[in-house]
Each structure stands twice: as structure tokens, then as C-alpha cells.
Amino acid sequence: MTTKRPKSLGRRRLPAGEPCGTCHMGLRRLGIDTTDWDYVVALAGNPNTGKSTVFNALTGLRQHVGNWPGKTVARAEGGFEYEGQKYKLVDLPGTYSLLSASTDEEIARDFILFGRPDCVVIVMDATVLERNLNLALQILEITDRAVVCLNLMDEARRKGIRIDDRSLARDLGVPVVPTVARTGQGMEELIAAVAGVARAKVRTRPHRIRAAGEAARSVDELAGLIESAYPGLPNARWVAMRLLEGDKRVENAITRGELVELATETIEPVGAGASLAEAEQ
């Protein structure tokens, strides 16, 4: 079966789609030009997961490379068209965590938290799935708009590794799409999953690890205070955990008013899309 690739994009303007005009304010503050784009998608993952190959397969090699504002880290952007709407794809630095211990981690974390892209594609290496779950779970703590791209499935098969992607999707609470980006296998399905999440047609329920004992009580108490102060903030629990860890970047976000802006941006109603279970049927 021939795999259908996304249509490459030139500079022609398409009619505006369903997205709201104010939802990309955070992205613009991070230096992302959202003009003439309907949706913005982030591509995240550990190093050596084939993330760049996924990026090239989705964008058809039509991409722009620059630097992140104020950083020496390269930033690649590209795009594709699907069902008459334009998706900008931003390739985040490959990283093993979002704990802001390095410049790459800080860039990836800030983009997902403060940029609030319409969807985050988490690229995972199917041959070392357990190693990749750390970053995936951290991303799912921040956003519920995510899709897992289970890449390098051909290498996993050669090593005798079998992965039940449907069970993994149920466990993680987000769509999981097996791919072989090098050959284009699964790219059409990945694009459809991204579109479903970005357009809020698929409702996700991401798995989030719960603390226990005194730690849990502290997180719950602080998260409640944050939710009261910033109604509508989509990731109050994660913000609470980072504050308890002494995360200076999140502390600065409070003093600078960035959390207020996050909370007041338009958020799609929870009942707007089909559930993940419904989408799988």
C-alpha cells in the first residue's frame, strides 16, 4: 500500500480555518510567526529517536532553520497542509527531560508550557520504549494535547519486540501511532491523529502520576491555590510541583504575569471532541 504524504507548502495563503485568533499569543512571544497558519504543532522527543526523520517526512524537506530567540540553539520549522488547513511544525531540541537543567530542556519546556501549541507530537523509539517514557510522562503533565509517534517500528520488529499500541494509547490516554518515518509508513495516520487533537475532535485523558503521602497533600493544596488565583490554567498540578521543586523559571512566570496570560487564553470546552476511546472505534 502506498503511503500518502502531506502536501508540501509554498507561500500561498489559505482561508482561515477553525482556530481562534488569540490562542497563539504565547507562541508569538516565543518568536514563532503564526501568520497564515491555522495550527502550530511541536515535535518533541529524546535524541536518536528519528525525530528529525519524522520532521522531514511531515514537511517534505520544506523547512526554515534559525535560532531560538536569545539562544545559540538551532530551531527548524516547516509545515504541511491537511484537509485544507495549514499546520506549522516546530522541531524542539532533543532532550531526555523537561526539568530545565540545560538550555535544550528549558527551550522545550517553555515552548510546551508557555507557547501552548495546538498539539505536541512525542516521538518515541520503539526499541527502547521504557527509556522514552520519562519525557513522555513529563510532557503529559503539562499538556493534554499530545500524540505519541511510536517510531522505528521496523527495527523493533527485527529485534523481536512487539508493542500493543492500542494498549499503550489507553495507558497513556493519548493517541499512539506506530511509524517508520524513514519509509513514510504511518505518516498519514500520524497526520490524521494530530489533526484530531489540534482541532479538539479527539478528547484525550493523559496519564498523570500521583504523589503519595505528605507530598501529595502539598501538591493538592498548592494546586488548589493556583487554580483559584488563575482560573482556567490547564496545568495547575504541574505548576505546583515545579514550584515545590524550587523551579525559578516557573516562579518568574508568576511574577511576570505569564500564568495570567496562560489562564485567560481561549481553551476549547472539554465536551467539544470525541473521547480517545470513541476515536479508536
Image (cartoon, helix red, strand yellow):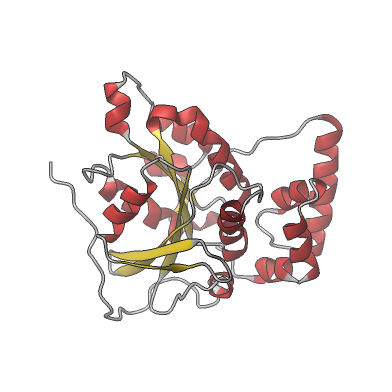
Above or below — where is 149 with respect to 40? above
42 to the left or right of 159: right
Residue 10 located left or right of residue 49:
left
Of all residues, the one furthest to the top in this rendering is 160
* Left-right relation of 222 to 1: right
Q: Is residue 217 visible?
A: yes
Looking at the rendered image, the quarter that the N terminus falls into is top left
* Image height of 67 relative to 276, above or below: below
Q: Quadrant location of the C terminus?
A: top left
Numbered marks: total: 0
Please tell me which residue is depicted at 31% across the width and 18% down the height of the picture. 160
* Residue 281 seen in the figure: no
Looking at the image, which is closer to me, 44 or 221? 44
Q: Which quadrant of the figure has residue 110?
A: bottom right
Q: Residue at x 58, y 74 (%)?
A: 29
Which residue is most to the front? 72
Q: Name the spot of residue 3 as percent of width and height, x first.
A: 18, 47
Foreground of the two, 221 or 48: 48
Picture residue at 38% right of the left edge, 57% below the top: 195
Q: Position of residue 68 (x, y in %)?
A: 52, 67
The image shows residue 176 at horizontal and vertical percentages of 41, 39
Residue in front for this viewpoint, 7 or 57: 57
Q: Is residue 115 above or below residue 121?
A: below
Judged left or right of residue 179, residue 144 is: right
Question: Looking at this rendering, what residue extends furthest in the left direction?
Answer: 1
**Relative vertical location of residue 20 with respect to residue 240 in this rendering, above or below:** below
Residue 36 x, y percent position in the rendering = 38, 78
